[in-house]
Image: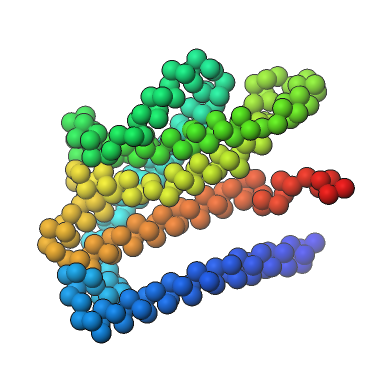
Amino acid sequence: MVGNHVRNTRGTLIKMFRRRIPTLVTVVLLLVVWEAWVRLAHVPATMIPSPSEIAQATVETWPTLWPATRITLLEGSVGFLLAVMLGILIGILLYCSRIANAALFPLLSAAQTMPLISIAPLFLIWFGFEISGKIVIVAIFGLFPIAVQTIRGLEAVPTFYSDVALTCGATRTWTLWHVKLRVAARQIYGGIRVSAAYIYATAATAEYLGARGGLGIWLQAAYNSFRTPLIFSATLVIIAITGILMCLVNLSERVLLGSTGSDDDPDAGQ
């Protein structure tokens, strides 16, 4: 049994690696073309730096880049966790109550249409330059896709799931938390992935508009000093930590819900 588990794990890892080969090849080719174009065309580093210049600048400034990254990581991660919890709870509330849906969903939608630059000054007035204000901004902008996908996922659950549970003596509350949410979990995770994709970018943008530290302040300082390689360094760090978060979200989905194939009906083909 242990041997089969090891073989299955090895086979899964090999399949994942094979799926990523085209992406890796494309990235390498783009970097090679980018490097060659900058060097052959003698493009100034203040306009477009080469990948090697960006890597060198990242290594040289890492002692100051990493503390800024930690601040953005803290703001984005805490804000993301709040967004997940509040998004799911709000989605459940709006699904269960038509009155709450009619009263709150338009306000929730309107909150997402406001540009960050228009509400950031308010949060500076309320929270100052502290981290707490950035966490609140991240949570507000991150919960909308989660709430929407929670509502849609619950509405898409076939009624026979509830009918079977209620027939077996389950309460509606138990059915909601143990049946409907489990069936809707894949779609809810879709909203979580959408939120995770821009959570750290939102935190950095909020910092850029007013903060004591973080990648947003780093970007602002790099822009003011016309150090273009450092702008790319901070951008790559944001992409990297976002990719790590996305991997953690996918891993948690696999641990909690299993592989996507585990949801298939084994009797569907019979």
Residue 97 falls left or right of residue 41: right
Q: Quadrant of residue 138?
A: top left
**At which x and y percent is residue 23?**
50, 69
Residue that sits furthest to the right in the current view: 270
Q: Who is closer to the viewer here, 91 or 139?
A: 91
Does residue 75 lie above or below 46 as drawn? Answer: above
Image quadrant where residue 36 sits? bottom left
Q: Residue at x 43, y 36 (%)?
A: 143
Q: Residue at x 59, y 67 (%)?
A: 19
Q: Nearer the viewer, residue 79 or 100?
A: 100
204 or 34, which lies in front?
Answer: 34
Q: Quadrant of residue 215?
A: bottom left
Residue found farthest to the top? 99
The residue shown at (66%, 50%) is 260
Q: Position of residue 32 (x, y in %)?
A: 37, 79
Give the total number of marks visible in the rendering.
0
- Whether residue 204 appears in this view of the structure is yes
Residue 239: x %, y % from top left: 38, 58
Horizontally, residue 121 falls left or right of residue 166, namely left
**Residue found at the very far bottom of the displayed protein:** 40
Q: Position of residue 193 (x, y in %)?
A: 49, 47
Q: Is residue 181 visible in this depiction of the protein?
A: no
Work out whether 64 lies above or below 142: below
Seen in the picture, residue 244 relative to 39 is either above or below; the reply is above
